[in-house]
Image (cartoon, rainbow, N blue to C red):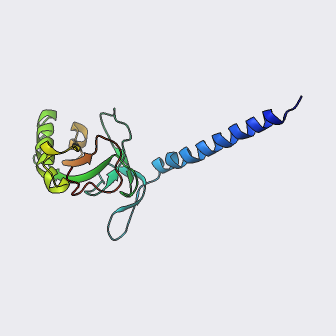
């Protein structure tokens, strides 16, 4: 009776598990660390967690929880890394009273779509790309949030680099 195959199998499984944990551990740890920005350009240079109120035009982010109704933090990454979205425009909604979800949706759609072509280099109706936006909720509005952040994506999958001028 030989125990070597059993030990070898155990070592291989242990090594595979350790490698998997090490690789996923980096992204787990990264999700708790704040994104790092270049001091001069403000560009994200090291991935990490970003407050949704701090994202800027040009930031690249990943989908964290697609089913969340409210988002407070997003995983920001350098645009040279694979990502889901790029912030391409932002604008403020005017007014003191929360306008309601339907009005915000209409303003977000109009505001983002009107800037889509100047960013992507092609009209939204002719593009294979899509967009969405982050918008104020009643609670964030009450805290002073008026910002809509437009995000562009490729429905075909992850993006590496920018979609600025992609014209597709």
State the residue lying farthest toward the bottom.
Answer: 40
Q: Is residue 152 toward the left or the right of residue 125 in the image?
A: right
In the displayed structure, would residue 36 be above or below residue 140?
below
Q: Percent from the top left, x then y, of residue 60? A: 33, 53
Can residue 167 be seen here? The reply is: yes
Task: Please report the residue visible at 34 percent of the width from the left and 32 percent of the height from the top.
Answer: 67
Instruction: Please identify the quadrant where the N terminus is shown.
Output: top right
Say which residue appears at 40% left-offset and 54% top-offset: 81
Relative to 101, does residue 46 appear above or below in the rendering?
below
Q: Residue at the location (38% across, 57% down)?
A: 78
Residue visible at 24% across and 45% down in the picture: 143
Q: Nearer the viewer, residue 43 or 152?
A: 152
**Where does the image place residue 144, in percent across and percent down from the top left?**
21, 48
* Residue 109 in which image quadrant: top left
Outermost residue to the top:
1
Looking at the picture, tell me which residue is in the foreground, 83 or 53. Answer: 83
Which of the pair 118/141 is nearer the observer?
A: 118
- Residue 99 location in percent, x, y? 12, 38
Side of 95 relative to 66 (left or right): left
């Amino acid at each position: 009776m030989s125990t070597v195959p059993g030990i070898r199998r155990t070592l291989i499984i242990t090594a595979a598990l350790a490698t998997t944990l090490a690789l996923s551990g980096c992204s787990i740890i990264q999700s708790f660390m704040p994104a790092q920005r270049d001091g001069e350009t403000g560009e994200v240079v090291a991935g990490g967690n970003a407050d949704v109120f701090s994202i800027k035009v040009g930031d690249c982010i990943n989908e964290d929880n697609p089913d969340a109704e409210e988002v407070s933090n997003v995983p920001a990454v350098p645009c040279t890394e694979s990502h889901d979205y790029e912030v391409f425009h932002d604008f403020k909604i005017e007014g003191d009273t929360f306008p309601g979800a339907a009005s915000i949706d209409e303003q977000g759609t109009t505001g983002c779509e009107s800037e889509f072509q100047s960013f992507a280099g092609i009209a939204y109706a002719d593009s294979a790309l899509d967009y969405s936006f982050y918008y104020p909720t009643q609670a964030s509005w009450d805290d002073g949030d008026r910002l809509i952040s437009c995000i562009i994506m490729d429905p075909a999958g992850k993006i590496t680099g920018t979609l600025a001028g992609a014209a597709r």
